[in-house]
């Protein structure tokens, strides 16, 4: 079940407006008999997926924003059927009132001197007000430079798991999602709705789509460049390294500016077919079961591609153990008749047969990873060096008011959101002469016209061997 993080807005001075979480459609049911105030037994269409474990599920009767909406707790055993036992109702509810599970019924309010949850001070814990589209809190007494919130389940004290963004008491910066949404809704004279179209969740999606629309205008934007990202250390016997999760394309090299080991020059890209050619007749797997030095049998994860007899290399604990063997039982992935087992190995250590070894000079991209053209061995200073990558990022999907925009023109994104609000209000059509839309297109074009990536191609001269230079 996916519940979004709690979001809030500083309305004025020290007034915090906490937006209620959007709720999934399931688990959900409805009353099939009217319930009176103080009732503790609810007759519902179906009680499937509701539980009284871990203190009992929290139930929202009605919808957030309805006058008599309230949150109660399952506090009795549940037998499959049409009955739910809860804490006493405060209000009467008619037939067909929605009953759904919610994870949290309270919010903790925090203050801090920095925009971080680290070292934050708990100001108070308040209950959600389900009869309103949001819950507000006025900070009194000690004031702070930044505020944040966290959802909590009062029953069994279960937390949401993460804090909200911490927002400056002076409001959002102009390059944040919260500032853009507030400005766009005010510009078109529209109120943010508690759920559905024109809600905060809807606005987050529109901001993301707007940034996507801008980013697609050029293949390479300077503000999407990421330099010297550390992909990790070169590991003995390992050729595959995971690409950054935010790279624009993890199946081709089009988003990669350069890949290098340590302080070396950038590696040369080769196609996947070229890489496969380099590794034809090469078998690779890992150790399945830890074995000791001098053991005469070794269990691999998969021995099917290994020769019936011969030798292979096990890369373990900083050394390469050249193992000789006389038998390969493929049904159990067991290598027998092992000799020259000097070091032993642990589960998951790399195992290769017929592999090229040494310092890599080329790479390919395959299914979210970079693959080197040679297997890193004990070449001096190779293992443990950083594997660096320069690349183009994709647009980060925003989901919080405190998120910072990727596009360096907040007003351009605001104009897109204004146009999308107007599009919804006009039945799904954009007026080509609408001022927000026209100005959005103009500012987007200005971004394109002013773009200077600063990146180009230059040739690295080959090293001249002076001993053979006849010039």
Image (cartoon, grey):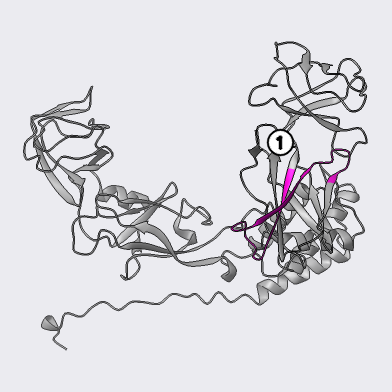
**Residue 144 x, y percent position in the rendering:** 73, 64
Residue 2 is drawn in which quadrant?
A: top right
Name the element at disc 1.
Answer: loop
Residue 282 shows in this picture = no
| Residue ID for mark 1 | 154
Q: Quadrant of the image for the N terminus?
A: top right
Residue 461 shows in this picture = yes
Which residue is pictured at 91% across the width and 32% down the height? 68
Which residue is pictured at 93% across the width and 36% down the height? 67
The mark tally for this picture is 1
Residue 168 is drawn in which quadrant?
A: bottom right
Which range is magenta?
Answer: 107-134
Left or right: where 234 falls relative to 457? left
369 and 135: which one is in front? 135
Q: Classify 10 Å Cα crowding around label 1: few (below 14), some (14-19), many (20 and above).
A: some
- Residue 37 in magenta stretch: no
Whether 295 is drawn above or below 361: the answer is above
Q: Quadrant of the image for the C terminus?
A: bottom left
Residue 270 is drawn in which quadrant?
A: bottom left
**Residue 456 x, y percent position in the rendering:** 47, 75
Which residue is pictured at 82% across the width and 42% down the height? 195
Whether 335 is drawn above or below 345: the answer is above
**Residue 193 x, y percent position in the rendering:** 86, 47
Left or right: where 354 falls relative to 155? left
**Residue 26 x, y percent position in the rendering:** 72, 27
Which residue, as the protein is rendered here, is positioned at the far front? 141
């Amino acid at each position: 079940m996916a519940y979004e993080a709690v979001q809030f807005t500083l309305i004025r001075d020290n007034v915090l407006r906490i937006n209620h979480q959007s709720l999934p459609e399931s688990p959900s049911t409805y009353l099939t008999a009217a319930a009176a105030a103080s009732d503790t037994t609810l007759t519902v269409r179906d009680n499937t997926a509701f539980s009284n474990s871990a203190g009992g599920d929290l139930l929202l009767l009605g919808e957030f924003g309805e006058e008599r909406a309230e949150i109660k707790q399952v506090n009795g055993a549940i037998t499959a059927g049409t009955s739910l036992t809860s804490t006493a109702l405060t209000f009467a509810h008619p037939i067909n009132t929605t009953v759904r599970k919610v994870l949290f019924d309270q919010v903790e309010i925090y203050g801090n001197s920095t925009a971080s949850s680290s070292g934050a001070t708990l100001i108070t814990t308040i209950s959600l007000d389900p009869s309103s589209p949001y819950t507000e809190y006025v900070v009194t007494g000690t004031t702070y430079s930044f505020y944040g919130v966290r959802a909590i389940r009062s029953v069994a004290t279960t937390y949401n798991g993460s804090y909200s963004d911490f927002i400056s008491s002076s409001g959002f910066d102009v390059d944040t999602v919260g500032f853009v949404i507030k400005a766009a809704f005010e510009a078109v004279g529209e109120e943010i709705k508690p759920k559905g179209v024109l809600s905060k969740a809807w606005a987050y999606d529109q901001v993301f789509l707007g940034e996507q629309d801008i980013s697609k205008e050029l293949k390479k934007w300077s503000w999407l460049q990421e330099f010297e990202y550390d992909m990790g250390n070169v590991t003995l016997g390992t050729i595959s390294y995971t690409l950054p999760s935010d790279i624009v394309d993890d199946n081709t090299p089009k988003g990669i500016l350069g890949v290098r080991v340590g302080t070396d020059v950038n590696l040369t890209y080769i196609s996947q077919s070229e890489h496969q050619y380099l590794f034809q007749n090469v078998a690779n797997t890992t150790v399945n079961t830890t074995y000791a030095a001098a053991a005469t049998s070794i269990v691999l994860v998969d021995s099917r591609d290994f020769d019936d007899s011969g030798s292979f290399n096990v890369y373990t604990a900083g050394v390469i153990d050249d193992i000789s063997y006389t038998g390969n039982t493929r049904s159990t992935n067991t290598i027998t008749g092992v000799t020259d087992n000097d070091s032993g190995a642990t589960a998951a250590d790399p195992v290769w047969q017929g592999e090229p070894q040494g310092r890599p000079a080329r790479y390919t991209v395959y299914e979210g990873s970079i693959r080197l053209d040679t297997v890193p061995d004990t070449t001096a200073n190779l293992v443990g060096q950083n594997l660096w990558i320069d690349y183009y990022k994709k647009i980060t999907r925003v989901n919080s008011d405190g998120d910072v925009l990727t596009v360096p023109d907040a007003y351009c994104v605001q104009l897109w959101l204004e146009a999308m609000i107007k599009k919804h209000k006009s039945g799904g059509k954009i007026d080509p002469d609408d001022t927000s839309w026209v100005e959005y297109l103009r500012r987007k074009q200005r971004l394109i016209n002013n773009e200077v990536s600063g990146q180009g191609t230059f040739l690295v001269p080959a090293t001249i061997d002076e001993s053979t230079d006849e010039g």
